[in-house]
Image (cartoon, rainbow, N blue to C red):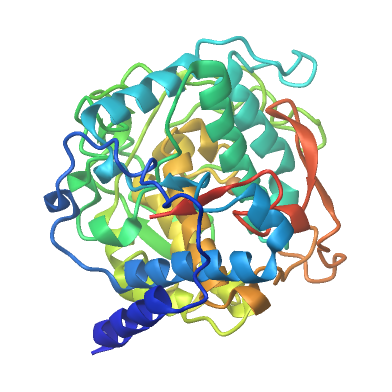
Amino acid sequence: MRTAVILAAVARVVTASAIPAFEEPASAHSFDKRDDFTPAALGGKILTADLYAGVAGLNQQLYQATQKPDQWKKCNPLNIVVRREWSTFSASEKSNYISAVQCMSKLPPKTPKSDCPGCKNRYDDFVATHIKQTFFIHNTGNFLAWHRWFTYAYEQTLRNECGYKGQHPYYNWPRWADNPMASPALDGSVTSMGGNGVAGCANQTFYGIPTNEQPLIKVPKGTGGGCVTSGPFKDWSVNLGPVFTDSLCTPPNPITDFMDPNFGLGSNSRCLKRDISAWTSSQWTNDEMVTKLLNSKDIQTFWSDMQGGVPAFQNNFMGVHTAGHFIIGGDPGSDFFTSPGDPWFYFHHAQIDRVWWTWQNLNPSSRTNAIYGTTFIADPTAPATKLTDKMTLGYAYPGELTVGEAMSTMGGPFCYTYL
Ligand SMILES: [Cu+2]
């Protein structure tokens, strides 16, 4: 029933006379490079959350065309690029993306040794930036904007420094909620981001959320936990952290003093470990959960529920953000400081961004600039985040962006949408 209502809404938007005319037809240049894609890759499932995303995509174009004429000149359907689900990438698109990520791990770091003794490569610059800023970018008002820019910066670095030609993929959690290891992103094949870790870490029966010591939710240990030994990332080296990990099988970082500006950034090279959890994804990243999140009436509700509700993780509720990280878990996936050390991080955060983008563009005039939260992690007494607050990405990416400039995927430096 709901599906029919949404389809009717889509049809109304499509036929609305407000759609601007273009001198040239909007070309399908971003969609037409799939050489071996079939809809069967999507498993035949139509997700309510995806229908919402479809409405949001059309809404955003109409809103920008009619309300943001200056931005519209710079970003419109003639030049906008489209981020797609990994399962819709062709084999060659997947290989190109994977090669670019591996390329980043072979380029020298830009972060000086004095700022990151353990940084070994260009990829680590991003992990180091995330570790250093963790307290100021999670459970804060800039959480969504900062991670939008961070994911974009990573995408641009893959393109500018490693020859990647495509757009960043995302992982659509609900499509694989019952069995993440069946997804083309995590099936362990040569065109995946690697699969589960081997059985390991036997001294741990659960991962505690938010901590092992005082768990509100106990994620049972799955069939993995050890090193990822198949797929393109079997030789991937995790060099930084851990800082705050629930994996007891990881050697501690040589710099553990929280007062040291380089805490967690000492050299600690080790294998990539995962413990993929359908237990987590089937409960908190399914279509019903994502749809419920998209129905949040205001930014406070959306922001809170995305991060585990208020108070966080009570009432057996993990929220899509933490649950998404625990789809893969392991090391560094379960460590919210070091989690970008697993290249799958960016698949998850592109989907976080897509869900935010969807929510924003269900009602773009009132939601594009809606923010909630403060400038310090989970501290309601810290100053509120403002749209004029500046963000930086350290040595990972040059420049400065205000929170306000990161509120629209068609504003600031951005010009992308999601399919
Ligand atoms: Cu983060």
Quadrant for the N terminus in the image: bottom left
Where on the picture, by quarter, is residue 267? top right
With respect to residue 270, does 78 lie above or below?
Answer: below
- Residue 291 in the image: state x and y as whole percent: 39, 75
- Horizontal side, residue 328 vs residue 253: left or right: left
- Residue 238 in the image: state x and y as whole percent: 49, 23
Q: How many marks?
A: 0
- Residue 97 in the image: state x and y as whole percent: 38, 27
Q: Please indicate, yes or no, whether residue 100 appears anywhere in the rendered image.
A: yes
- Horizontal side, residue 337 vs residue 383: left or right: left
- Residue at horizontal 48 percent and vertical 18 percent from the top: 163
Quadrant for the C terminus in the image: bottom left
- Residue 282 in the image: state x and y as whole percent: 27, 64
With respect to residue 364, does 12 lie above or below?
Answer: below
With respect to residue 42, does 108 lie above or below?
Answer: above
Q: Residue furthest front?
A: 23
Where on the picture, by quarter, is residue 70? bottom right
- Residue at horizontal 29 percent and vertical 22 percent from the top: 232
With respect to residue 410, does 132 lie above or below?
Answer: above
- Residue at horizontal 54 percent and vertical 21 percent from the top: 239
User: Is 15 or 253 nearer to us in this picture?
Assistant: 15
